[in-house]
Image (tube, rainbow, N blue to C red):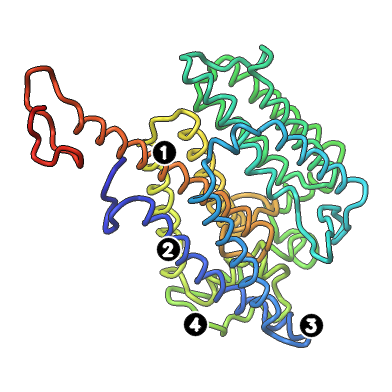
Amino acid sequence: MQKRFLIWDNPRDAVLTIVLCLMFIGCVNVFSASFVSAKAMFGTGYYYLYRYALFGFLGLISLVVVGWKINYRVWLKYRTPIFYLFFVLLLCVDLFGITTKGAQRWLVIAGFSFQPSEFVKLAVIIMGAGSLGSLMHKGKVPDLLQFPVNLAFIQSVVLAGMVLIQPDMGTAAIILALMIVLYVIAGLPLKELGMLASICATGVVVMIAVAPYRLSRILIWLDPWRDAQGSGYQSVQSFVSIGSGGWLGSHFGMGTGKFFFLPEAHTDFAFAIFCQEWGFFGALGLLFLFLVLAKAIYTIGQNTTDEKGFLLVTGINFLVVGQAIANMAMVCGILPVIGVPLSFISYGGTSLIATLGAVGLVVAVYNDEVKKSKLQNTQVKTFSPKGGRSWPSRANPRGRRK
């Protein structure tokens, strides 16, 4: 495992440092973006700040437990029970979930609401890494037409379909895309990839045809000013917030978008408020942090000798950083509005805990590689060729022949 990464002693320390920096930025941005609406709705401007801190604390606990206390292979071993667990949870959401803003995506247990679909994103990575990693270890390539090689893909389609019913097409697309990425990395033949792309394109057309509001969303994405006071209002206000930030921004707490101009200012469109208050250079700095994070996670994956660990780390990289890039692109109008959170920056308790748990798995893979490297070094040092001088060890510190 690589010992140095830029200014850090190792890539794991880089990942942890950057994640903590992003959480601090997210905590500050969530407070700034939400204190006006929080004061109006809950009587205190600190409502979302307190909740972000609470969920962040729980997420950090999950990171430590997953990263240092549980071997990541345990999660891969129980990938089938994990599928059934989330199948049941999503079924409960579809039947008994809480409906908010026209979508039935939340469950309430013991007074706490959470969104199971955020954990499903991580679950499909675990399922894909466990299944395809074994295939890669045997030197075989995946085949979407052969069972049980395609089992993980079928499971992801089932879970994505249940999320789509809520309806949440954006999250469903991410769930399916994560599994497709893992299949491609595992060596999916180009012929099958082309067939899969055709099926997905056809599916998107069908989904748009059966739900006209999705076609309207695409048209608004192409030209939000065609209905600037209606369907395009959120996108237009996002552009106004970003553009008014200029090079240096209006500074902390001074952004006007949160004064009931920009809907979802502290959740999906938190990046717009960040751009308004910290300007172009602030946005560039945030993007730089995510790119360094991506490089650090990539480095861990490339230096992992276990195929399952490699796929797990790579999938998490696409989940954490890829989702963040997608959110920035959505807020800037490069992608249509699909409800993708900005990792660590957007408010969302379930998303924050799931993301930190995913980072914990990356740490677990790195720690496992370190243990294996130390074990191999110990075995080399204690090895003594016949008739030669033995290597020094704790039992034989001077390396004398016995």
4 or 2: tag closer to the N-terminus: 4
Characterize the local packing of mark 3: few (<14), some (14-19) or many (20 or more) Cα atoms within 10 angstroms.
few
Q: Quadrant of residue 54?
A: bottom right
Asked whether, in this view, residue 213 is left or right of residue 222, the answer is right
Q: Which mark is residue 251?
A: 4
Q: Which residue is mark 2?
A: 284
Circle 4: residue type: His
Question: What secondary structure is found at the residue carrying circle 2?
Answer: helix
Sequence-first tag of 3 and 2: 3
Rounded to the nearest whole Å, what is the CA distance between mark 4 and mark 2?
Answer: 15 Å
* Closer-to-camera residue (9/370): 370
Residue picked out by circle 3: 42
| Classed neighbour count for the residue bearing mark 1: other residues with Cα under 10 Å, few (<14), some (14–19), many (≥20) | many
Dividing the picture into quadrants, the one containing residue 158 is top right
* Camera-nearest residue between 370 and 205: 370
Question: Circle 1 sits in a helix, a strand or a loop, which is it?
Answer: helix
Q: Which tag is nearer the camera, tag 1 or tag 4? A: 1
Which residue type does callout 3 highlight? Phe
Q: Is residue 194 positioned above or below 254 on the image?
A: above
- What separation in Å lies between label 2 and label 1 (alpha carbons)? 26 Å
Q: Depth-wise, is mark 3 or mark 4 nearer the camera?
A: 3
Q: Residues under labels 3 and 2: Cα distance?
A: 34 Å
Q: CA distance from mark 3 to mark 4?
A: 25 Å
Q: CA distance from mark 3 to mark 1?
A: 44 Å
Residue at left offset 13%, top offset 37%: 392
How many numbered marks are there? 4
Return the residue nearer the eye: 342 or 282. Answer: 342
Residue located 66% across and 33% down the image? 79
Q: What residue is pinned by disc 1? A: 301
Circle nearer the N terminus (1, 4): 4
Kindly indicate whether the residue at mark 2 contacts the one at mark 3 (C-beta within 8 angstroms): no
